Amino acid sequence: MDRSSSQPDDAFAGEARGELSPRVARALWWGSACLVLAVLGTSVLVAGAEHGRRLPVSMTLVLAQACALRWQVRAPVPVLAANAATGLVVWALLPAVTLTGALLAAQVTLCVLSATRPRRVSAWALAAMCLPAPLASGAGGPTGLAVYLLTVVLAWTAGQWRRAHQARTRAEMRRAVVEERARIAREVHDVVAHTLSVMVIQAGAADDVFTERPEQAREALRAIESGARSALGELRLLLRAFQLDAGEGGAGERRAPGPSLSRLDELADTVRATGMTVHVHREGAVDGLAAGVDLAAYRIVQEALTNTLRHAAGADEVGVRVTVEEECVKVTVVDNGRTSQNRSAAAGAGRGLVGMKERARLVGGSLHAGPLPGGGFEVAAHLPVERTS
């Protein structure tokens, strides 16, 4: 099981438009700006040592390019135009700086544009970046021309590769969410069917004792009312998740109701059988929890434990804490595995976390997962309490 995130309708909208999170955009800016200042800035300082008057202007233009990269994710086309223009001016002032180096910031922006904008837009940008190629040929000959065209095409190709990778990742995440919703819908269907079956039995019992033992009949009717309220809540969850296709599964297929938090010890025993030490700590009573919340909490623990077994390098101990409060159920699973870069990246790139987040979201809760500063990995969920009594 891998880790990933979230809704198929909204969570991917930003990526589909080519948007990046503020943190990623800021890191991209700092990285690209440092690259431009280190490479182009050094070249300008060396080439401008003999041109005292041109050096300050050239360095100012280099700094302007680095600052313009701040908006390369939000507005890559204007930034590309600005960096290309200032790069050509730098090259005109200091011909000793190659055209490829002078347009380094523009090439970086072309890569970002190619990764975040439709191909038709990036193709026009690629064609525009190829227009100065004759200048490279005149200054550096065939070698200069080849180097310039190669770097421009590589920048555009790298962006296209990144865009294709993101598209594949989004498609995989959408499939994972749809499959998880189908699984949730089947389980909620089973819970509702079980509740309705109990209601039928209780109604029959109430009818049998209605005359002779009216108090017992009233208790059965109250149980029917409680069961009906629970079933309505589960039906709302079912409709929010997904409507089962009419042809899915056999008409007479029967499935056992899903497990619950009361069976956490059984789940822990299956993990202990692999050699892992599992500590289970529970606070509060799970009796009376809505079946959907109960089932969602159990499945989150199950997925988190499976994730520990598969991906937590060096982990030999995991703690499970379930706290049932007045307003929410808190579920925390923490292991002591090594926090490597690969494991941190896997937290947003697979199906496991998609399923856990989808389960939490559909019952009105939230879930966070990530590496801990001192090592290990934590999955923490908050699910709203809905009592059936």
Image: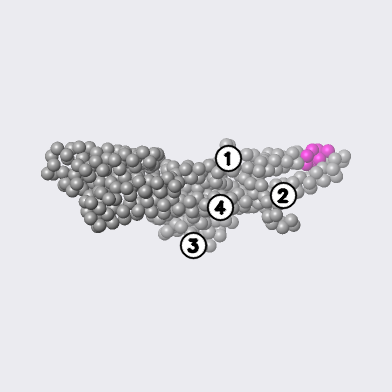
**Residue 380 point in image, percent of width and height:** 49, 45
Disc on the earlier residue, 4 or 2:
4
As drawn, the label of residue 175 is 4
> From mark 2 to mark 3, how far is it between C-alphas?
36 Å
What residue type is disc 3 on? Gly
Mark closest to the chain's N terminus, 1 or 3? 3
Q: Earlier in the sequence, mark 2 or mark 3?
A: 2
Which residue is denoted by mark 1 in the rendering? 364
* Rendering coords of residue 230 (x, y %): 69, 41
Q: Which residue is mark 2?
A: 194
Q: Earlier in the sequence, mark 4 or mark 1?
A: 4
Which of the two marks, 2 or 3, is nearer to us in this view?
Answer: 2
Kind of residue at badge 1: Gly
Distance CA(mark 4)–CA(mark 1): 22 Å
Residue 55, quarter of the rendered image: top left
Q: Which residue is mark 3?
A: 275
Looking at the rendering, the stretch of residues picked out in magenta corresponds to 214-221
Query: Residue 178 versus residue 149: which sits nearer the camera?
Result: 149
Query: How is the model colour-coded?
Result: one colour
